[in-house]
Image: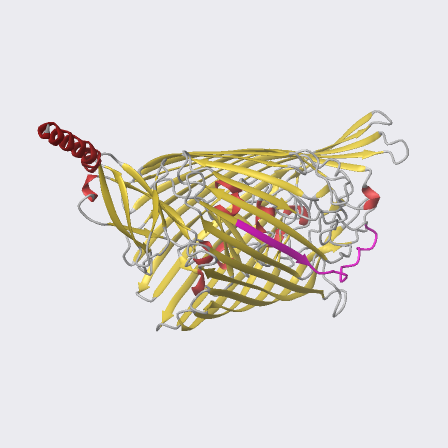
Amino acid sequence: MKYYQLVKWVMAFFLAVSPVFIYSQQNVEIKGIVYEEKSQIPIEFANISIKNAAAGTTTDAAGRFKIIIAKEKQTVIIVSHINYHKKEIVVNDSLFSGNVTIYLSPKEFQLSDVVISAGLYEQPIDKLTKPADLISHREIVDNMNSNITDVLNKTPGFTQVWEYHSPIILRGLNSNRLIIMKDGNRRIGTFPGGYFGQDMNIYDSRKIEIIKGPGSVIYGSGAISGIINLVSAEPFGDNKNSVQLSSGYGSNNNEFLELVKVCHKREKFGISLNGKYRKTGEMIYGNGEIAENSNVEDRDISLNTGYKFSDKHKIIINANYHYGDWGKPRGFNGPTKRFTKVRNEEENFHTDFAYSYTPKGIVESVNLNLYYDNGWRDYYQYKYSTVSGNLSTLDLVHYKNSYGGGRFYTILNVSEKNKLTTGIDGYLFRLDNPSEIFDYYNDTHGSIAGSKNAGQQNIGAFINDEWQIGEKWQFVSGIRFDAATVVEGEKDTMNGRNEKREAFSGNAGFVYSPNKTTHISFNAGRAFRMPTTEELFTRIISCKGIKVGNPALQPEYSWNFDIGIRGKILKQKLKYDLALFYNILDDFINEAPAEEPDVDFTLKNTDAKLMGGEFSAAYQFNNVFKSSNSLYLGTGAAYVYGVDLAEGENAPLFGIPPFKMNTEIDYRGLINKTWVTGYSIKFDAEYASAQNRVAEIPEGTDGGPWGYVPSDPNTVFNFALGLNSNALPGYPKLRFMVKNIFNTDYQPFGSYIPAMGRNFKILLSFHF
């Protein structure tokens, strides 16, 4: 009896301990420490989870963690934190006997920001003599922006007039006086107001860099108020394949957004394919009125590839295709022109090539960039009878443009503290714009040959010097010379006129850093803009009316002075940036009455000046309600005052926006549940004061589609909720937004039409 009892006890003990024994054979405990990448400080409350599993833990005050994983099997561990970029690591047998060390990089509001656009090489923003801003890819996607105008709107210094297609206004100057680039390559538009960026796919960019102030030394004509550079990710690096999918919907205009990115990366080779499809119906204003003719359709495909021959040699190739069909809301160009309807259909192909050789000696790098762009745009201006409402005439302009260019430059390390950049660049732009006139009342059709092979070509050479004196002083200086030819092209089978222009530009500035977290900057720069062929020669039909060029126009120059202070205080939790500027514009190209009959306006050189500034600040509270949660507060403001000196000592300059201010509250937390890992809740408000100081409408004209009408003060409130999971397949991320929560009925600065009313948006993303 005792024998059987003993056997039962032995069997019971064996059954009890065998799962533990088997478990210990099949699983292993991994230990590790999580650090901040640059400071090497341990990160507390980092979330540690296993891919496609519910198991997880968090790091302690010393950044340490323990987690059980399956033995003899590759396991993907996901490390995430509210304030840091998520990281995945593959655990294998080689790590079982020791600790895992993981480094995380901080997110953008705490990131040690680095830009390449200021001097063609990586520089921390703190060491720039001019103000700069960065917009991350996460910001672009999370806000479900429609285009670059939407993205820039909340950055201090920028102003948006309309939805979708709007002049990009920086420091009171529109798109003609700033340069928009993709990977450092200039983009040129076919609109009289400059390049508006509606044909760029913002979702295939890794980040957007903004440098405010004169940039002509590096980038040439047009960089008066600043430059905007959309930067792509390098195609090679990590050994991984990935697929990213996003699908979004907007209620106001029945918007559908579909995004896809397929990526194959290896150490020396990589390729990624991006696609975007966006279609909307007609939007609804805050007063409930439907914005007739405001529907939009975009199709974009982009290819990014490259090969790294060695650590010293690499090439990168990009190709982009865009098709767009979009309209402007009826009445956008003034209440007296509501009988007109404007639509545009466009197609564009862009490609660029970059080669770099980096010996990392005295010659740090030798670089060659080439780009080419080809596209067309059909501009339809329908006119309806004010009595019967029937279609009476159609003005149809066929724009066809092609341009290409490149830059060759070398970066030299003259000494450990002295860096010299020298190079040459140039571009050639050509435009055809024949027109057709349809008269439906009289059943007639006519055509205007317009210009053929009109355009401009520019070549420039520059040298830029940067040197550091001690630990506190950094100086920058540069000079550039440009020679341009503006070509009228063929007109009525005759060769047109050519006009040559030359320009010098320069820049000098310094940064003084009394300590590691405070940086005082000053910059004085002379920038310029060559007149375009449309401004010198072309007679065109636009939404402002019929415009004729002025061949006597001279290049416009800017003397721009910037002073700024930026840094971090309160244990580096409060980040601030204050920038003030004063801009003197000589030979400013402005609209003027035309003497020719049947012409609405022309252009002339005048003088102007602008002054103002931008301010931004951000503060982060840690351990809010829970030890792993944080609260982020941010604010930004901008003001500019412009004077048209040709009209008097205090005459308002055209297009000067009112005082603007943005505030933001963003709460982020970790849940670490099976279905949800983290969440974010954000409220933000946008305020614009009244602007009654507007330019007078030029004599003999109807003005234009924006800028000549006063605006009332307005405040718009927005909300966003974000949820993400590290445990579910594809790491789903859900974003719910409400734009214009209270359905505020208002007209943005300079606009004749109201802004979009309340808009519910939802975006679901997966990353496989």
- Residue plotted at (17% across, 45% down): 97
Type of secondary structure dominating the magenta stretch: loop
View extreme (right): residue: 387
**Residue 723 place in picture, x, y as percent:** 49, 43
Is residue 700 on the magenta stretch? Answer: yes
Q: Quadrant of residue 124?
A: bottom left
Residue 554 shown left or right of residue 672 in the figure: right
Q: How many labels does the image show?
A: 0
Furthest toward the bottom, the residue is: 514
Of residue 453 and residue 25, the one placed in the foreground of this image is 25
151 left or right of 593 in image: left
- Residue 693 as seen in the image, left or right of residue 236: right
In this rendering, does residue 570 appear at all? yes
Quarter residue 23 falls in? top left
- Residue nearer the viewer, 395 or 472: 472
Q: In this view, does 85 lie above or below 617?
A: above
* Region in magenta: 681-701
Q: Is residue 264 magenta?
A: no
Q: In the picture shown, does residue 321 fall above or below 427?
A: above
State the quadrant of the N terminus.
top left
Residue 511 placement (x, y as % from top left): 45, 70
Residue 247 location (% of width, % of height): 53, 34
Q: Which of 121 and 525 lies nearest the eye of the viewer?
A: 121
